[in-house]
Amino acid sequence: MREGNKIVTNRNLNLNSLLFVLLITLKVIFPQKTIAIHFYGSVETKIQRDSLNNYIYSEVLSQSTLEKRDISLFDIKNKISQIFIIDINIFPLKFLNEDEIPENQQYNIYINNNLLNYDDFVYFYNIVMSFPYLIENINECKYLKIFRIIDIFKFKNDKLFIDFIRYMLASVVFNLVDLEKWNVFSKTKNVYLVNDAISKKVILEFFRLYFIDNRTSNKIRDISRILESIKLYKFVIINTKEDFLYIYNDILQEILKIHKNIKSFQKIFNTIFKIHIFKRLLLFKINYNCKYNCLLDLCLFKNCDEIFLLECLNTEILIQKIYEFRKFIPLKTLSIIDSKFTIKDEISWFETLNVEKFYYVVSKYNSVTKFSKFGPESPLCNIFYKFKEQIYNKENESNIYNRDSDCPCYDQNTRIDLKCHQEKSKIERLINIKFPFQEFVYMEVTNSFIKFSFYLMNYKEFQNITIEFSYTNLKDFNLKKSEILNYREIYTNIEILTNIVTMRIYNSILNDIFLSKVLLFPSLKRLFISKSEIIFSNEKVEFDRNYKIESFCCNESRVNNKKCVFDFIYKLDALKEFEISCYTQITNIFEPKFYDENLIMINVTNLKYSVKYYNNDYTPFYSIFPNLLHFDFSFECPEGTLYNIFFKKNFVYLRSLTFNDITVGIKDANALKDLRNLTLLYFNENCKFTEISFCNLFDSNNSYLLEELRFPNMEYTYCDLQFLMRLKFLKKIYVHGFINKNNIIFLLKVFSSGVKITIKNVFQFKNQIVEGFGLAAI
């Protein structure tokens, strides 16, 4: 019996020893990394510098920002009330800075109890750790508490974070009994507002929960079409940095389909918008009909302060309905941009609106009223005479000539036309309107050689003027430096000159004197020279530094002194976008022997270089652009060009790279291996791969951030597919074609989920797809 007990005891000792060794082994394999959250009282104490690893959240909830402070004099005994330890190896959500935590060390976060208390965080922690089980008995307070904590900690926006948001929403959607008891306090003052960025993610996942297709729901996040449409109006009213919720017409259509099939949807949707409040809405291409009324009654529209309508139809009916459902509570800002009305006299209707600020941008495609004669009785005579005084004046008559003759482009008898994109009957009424209203009308002032296009606010103030010269010989420009430098004091005297933001020069001759005057325009941001000739004189002209021009494009233009043109370019201190395009060797201004490599263009982030390759050309050295983010390169470049440009060169910040009409070959091996921060890489369809695989451009031992790829018609090797599979951030692939049609099966099988693959003329490969995936795949 004793021997039996001894055997059992030995077995237990062996088992305990084994468990001990196992625990020690696991601790070695998975070193513990912890975060300690210290909850302390609200009394402020001056804190000295100790370690940047100790963070204290701001007590101001609206800021929700981290402040780096020291804790050497922090009175822990008197201040800290409770501490919560998190093992980040098992906590699903990722803190922004947790990768910086050394192994077997603890990271400290100090939070004032007024911002977040211990009990609330314990509730949140238990909810996260129970993921993916649905939350029981969730009410509006618990829901808001969870998102408030998410906002405070700014967790990483990874797949687990998105899954957690979806799990939160599922807990609401599948708990309708509890939802009926929700009493959302949308009208209570000082209620915490969830961050707009988080709220957009919530709405996006809410749509996906109801199987709204990704193409439609992603329009909430992908606003590229809207940004393209409003870029002409940014100077007027739209600040794209503000947080807007963007709503397309097809999004509303999808919501209506769900509303028709699921009775509870509108109540859930409305409850979500009571908590996730958006103060600014932008409605894009909305074509109102009465079916939308059930959506306009949502809190989404009732809680907002600003509404922008861009390219909408039936506009006045849409706005009227929004006001009715808001019970005519006034908006702070209403903006109508390039939209259509069903009524002829929208101006009288405008005067009935109750709004603090109202902006109306008339469509450029409205009916055009043309003026050629301007008597004192003309409503636009004041505009005409400003151009006569400031541009078409006697001084400039001797500066601007016809390119093909020695005749001035105009004199005092030259006919000047003014086109106003507004009906003639409305112009005078809008000039005299007294309603708190700002209207922007598109206008053009032209003669045969010079054109001005601009918006005029309330027929008084010029906005966003573009000046274009065509077939001219530009010798000088009447621009007094003393006046320009002090233009704020004498604004009314040179109002046009100080509002020119874009200059375009086509098929013209211009000299260094004219270029020196260009640098003096106080608001000029974009300069475009195309198919022109730039002549520098023997006598050197001094160029002043310019801090306004952000974009410069030189397209197919000849220069008699390429060194001097770089003297001009180097004065553009604010330059961000630089574009050179030429199809003949003589028009390439970007030759290495003419620029100084010691001069750095530090602000240039976008470079478009479209220069035809010629034998014996030296590939330009791009070290003068150390901060490039976007590089578009072309064309007719031979094998080895990529290697010459990119191998062991300093392109550390490059994010997107586009190639057009280049040949990639064995001489380009490892050319892109150092571009580890690249997220977008496009080889357009006229590119060719010869005797090299795509993966050979990179180093297989490196990790890359590539998210989007575009391939020409090429063959894919096994190594290519292996390399693509290791790109853990890859989201989109666009394929122009396959040399080997069987490659399509391997590519689609490798990325069966998680990566969107688009194939040009996909039906050419119908047989291969059906063979590999069946008819359902087509």
Image (spheres, rainbow, N blue to C red):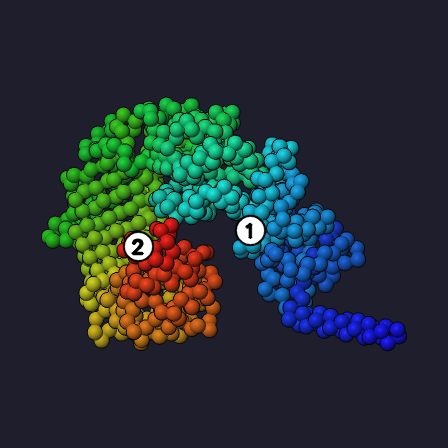
Q: Nearer the viewer, residue 192 or 393?
A: 192
In the picture, measured across the screen, residue 461 lies left or right of residue 320, that is: left
Looking at the picture, how far across and down is residue 586, in whole percent?
Answer: 19, 66
Horizontal placement of 123 versus 351: left or right?
right
The image shows residue 190 at horizontal and vertical percentages of: 63, 37
Q: Quickly name the residue at label 2.
A: 766
| Residue 733, image quadrant | bottom left
Secondary structure at badge 2 equals: helix
In the rendered image of this protein, does residue 767 appear above or below residue 314? below
Judge whether 128 appears above or below 721 on screen: above
User: What residue is shown at x 58% (from left), y 53% (from top)?
Assistant: 154
Compare residues 267 and 196 and report the one nearer the observer: 267
What mark, if any, has residue 91 been given in the picture? none
On the picture, is 322 further left or further right than 171? left
Quadrant in the picture for residue 659: bottom left
Task: Name the residue rendered at 27%, 29% in the picture.
Answer: 423
Secondary structure at badge 1 equals: helix
Q: Residue at x 68, y 51 (%)?
A: 126
Residue, far front: 1
Which disc, if any, is residue 163? 1
As shown in the figure, which amino acid type bears the numbered disc 2? Lys
Q: In front here: 413 or 104? A: 104
Q: Earlier in the sequence, mark 2 or mark 1?
A: 1
Separation of marks 2 and 1 at Cα, in angstroms: 35 Å
What's under tag 1, amino acid-wise? Asp
Question: In the image, residue 192 lies at what x, y percent?
Answer: 62, 41
Q: Is residue 440 left or right of residue 264?
A: left
Q: Is residue 113 visible?
A: no
